Amino acid sequence: MTPPAEAAAGLAAVKEVLKQSVTKPGLARAVVALTNTNQPDGFDCPGCAWPDSASKKHVDFCENGAKAIADEATRKRADATFFKHSPISALAGRTGQWLNDQGRITEPLVKRNDSDRYEAISWDDAFELIGQELNALDNPDQAAFYTSGRTSNEGAFLYQLFVRQFGTNNFPDCSNLCHESSGRGMTESIGTGKGTVHLEDFVLADAIFILGQNPGSNHPRMLATLQEAKRAGATIVTVNPLDEAGLKRFKNPQEVSGLLGKGTKLSDLHVPVRVNGDVAFLKGLCKAMLEAELAVPGSALDTEFINTYTEGFTEFAADIEQTPWASIEKASGVSRGLIAEAAAIAISAENTICCWAMGLTQHKNAVANIQEVLNFLMLRGNLGKPGAGACPVRGHSNVQGDRTMGIWERPNAALLDALQAEFAFDPPREHGLDAIDTINAMHDGMVKVFIALGGNFMAATPDWPYTTKALESCRLTVQISTKLNRSHTVTGEQALILPALGRTEIDEQRGELQFVTVENSMGVVSRSEGKLKPISDEMRSELSIIAGMAEATLADSGAVKWSDLGSRYDHVRDHISRVIPGFNNFNRRIREAPRLVLPHAVRDERVFNTPSGKALFTVHNFDLPDFPEGHYLMMTIRSHDQFNTTVYSQNDRYRGIAGSRMVVFMAPADIKAAGFTDGQLLDISSHHKGKTRMMEGFRLVPYAIPRGCVATYYPESNPLIPLDHVADISNTPAYKSVEVSLKAAS
Ligand SMILES: Nc1nc2c(c(=O)[nH]1)N[C@H]1C(S)=C(S)[C@@H](COP(=O)(O)OP(=O)(O)OC[C@H]3O[C@@H](n4cnc5c(=O)[nH]c(N)nc54)[C@H](O)[C@@H]3O)O[C@H]1N2
Ligand SMILES: Nc1nc2c(c(=O)[nH]1)N[C@H]1C(S)=C(S)[C@@H](COP(=O)(O)OP(=O)(O)OC[C@H]3O[C@@H](n4cnc5c(=O)[nH]c(N)nc54)[C@H](O)[C@@H]3O)O[C@H]1N2
Ligand SMILES: [Mo]
């Protein structure tokens, strides 16, 4: 434990890039990879979904993008020989970090009935097994098809076509675990689930509120955008239980002053909200603005916008008026004075952007969080004008595109009609299972085949013992993966691992180089073409794997020749251009210009596609924290050295942690009150609906976090997360609102 950092990036980031690049892919491969990252003729960084810079830069990657690339570009191989010597039961005892460190999966593998080992299998036999098992089901709804957010647009489109032709909408995906609450809240309030800003809006913003997001670690390229915005005069407010280093100062590694100087101050006002205190805080913010308007009419609200474009304001204002300051302060943990300071910044700003991520979306009342952000923005007309808007910052690099392409368990009729017209089949109309419902369905024997296009479903989801049992109840589990992870150690009766090419790799099909496309967090589509030679000839592209599974399961039909679609991505794009809105003439346009901007009704035209055609003010209540003595609210967060379940090291540089991720952050005053000592080993129990889950061995770290709140790292603490503790409406696990108690390790 050392004191937390006061600034992000700088020389330390450059050193880390070099270290990772030399040790994993080697310098030569690393140079090819990094000079092609986020370049028009190169590939999209497989890290986060923050947009590339519009102006051409020679270097457009960050420390953590470089880590993700090095991790994929490694020359190390987990091949059949490795698996021969590694029974699955032994792998199950290893850490996620160790599993990932074994290298790339380089050939298809099978675990047969009653075997404890993976062994090599040919691609044809693997596809045949999948086809047989899928076709042996009583009905298509007995299979579920997971997607993680690295899949390309073309891969996602082909996958949903396969699955819908097979006959189900069971599409659990990482969105269900991530920004689902944003999508649901935004769609109801403003008629779109996508963010309403562009990268170019940031330099036009007067105020930027960043809520529940840690861009220094999870979207480091965003810091350069914030730096530009600051230089253009923006004021930044951060709302977060932790005063994250990355939001304090930024040392831009691409500027001499960033490497050697103090860097740029980013946050002007930090609001240390209690975990899950955001509804109360945002209501306080709105209350202060309404009070200012009452005192001096015309001073704080954009009444013209409210009257022309919204409905529900009267009920909203009445509810805010009735909400006492005392309960706002108590539930948010923020003083009225500090709320007033934040409100003053909002009122003096002509244009305000709100950015948010998992700190808002992973709570029981997460949809309410998002809708309160929209209420706040609407008060001053901050939707559909330059320099202002809602910016849900997406996680995986193509998670937004996967949804656009139809990876959704609740497809709308327009998509299904378009698929029907294009491919002449009857797509299933009933909604399918999301991630949490899939786990329950597997557990109860309703789903028997589980196929995952990327990701690490088992480790990313709550309640590992329950999820393990669910996966083990399947007849067949299939993981299409680049790297070994915990999900490969938890199998159905039979299991397959199918090795996929990654973003960084050359994808040649029938002698022709292929490229794919991705959509960033701001609705801009760009092409991505890998440049590295794959380390094994046995790895296949996601599209060709999907086509192989489909061909073995379904026959070709008039419009669909699977092997053609799996090897000619232009043909997939032709279908996309006719099925998905905004993609007309896709092949031509994506070749003519490096970026294709998708239309967006709110941003482009101030049109709100809600049933009434107006943006909706919504009313939400909040609970006062009322845990029994000795209980705390736990959030689970990412370190600086991981990408989701892929852990690169045991360190978290900005928070001053080295050597272990099994730590629990707690306020010094709470440590004292509980009679604990710094560095002590604790056991943590979570409590939900009468059920207790316990984990041993967390080291206690005193940290500046609001009282009554604690933090641990994801995914290590996922066994503590109750599966049935989810967000209302969006069904996203409340990973950041877990009631826990702590006791000295026995
Ligand atoms: N390097 C790297 N990049 C990543 C990822 C990664 O793991 N590593 N993951 C990718 C993915 S899929 C995603 S979704 C994003 C995640 O990006 P983030 O959302 O930034 O990640 P988290 O660490 O989950 O937590 C976000 C922040 O929310 C705060 N927080 C927690 N609870 C609350 C609350 O109740 N209220 C408020 N206001 N704040 C709260 C935490 O203190 C933390 O700073 O990043 C993406 N990019
Ligand atoms: N407690 C807690 N749990 C959480 C969260 C949290 O904040 N707290 N966050 C949630 C969020 S926001 C998310 S998005 C999920 C993430 O859930 P997932 O997306 O399921 O998990 P990842 O860790 O990103 O998946 C990593 C694996 O993907 C595979 N992979 C990587 N690249 C590729 C590729 O190009 N193709 C293929 N086919 N496979 C590839 C590799 O085998 C790697 O091991 O976790 C969720 N779980
Ligand atoms: Mo995510």
Image: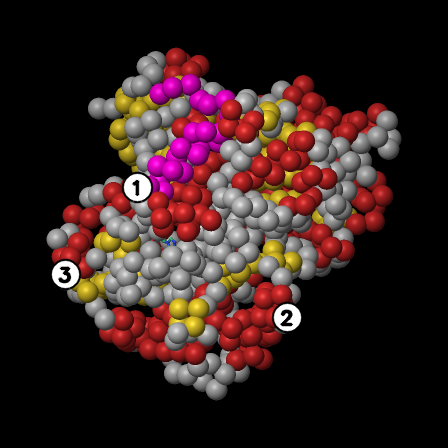
504 or 375: nearer the eye?
504
Numbered range of the magenta stretch = 1-23
For label 2, the SS is loop
Tag 3: residue type? Answer: Ser
Q: Residue at x 28, y 51 (%)?
A: 75
Please say if 337 is above or below 728: above
Say which label, 2 or 1, has the lower sequence index: 1
Q: Position of residue 90 (x, y in %)?
A: 16, 48
Left of 635 or right of it: where is 574? right
Left of 742 or right of it: where is 327? right
Classify mark 1: residues with Cα within 10 Å, few (<14), some (14-19) or many (20+).
Answer: some
**Residue corresponding to mark 2:** 584
Q: Is residue 715 magenta?
A: no
- CA–CA distance between discs 2 and 1? 44 Å
Q: Position of residue 373 (x, y in %)?
A: 65, 40
- CA–CA distance between discs 3 and 1? 35 Å
**Residue corresponding to mark 3:** 115
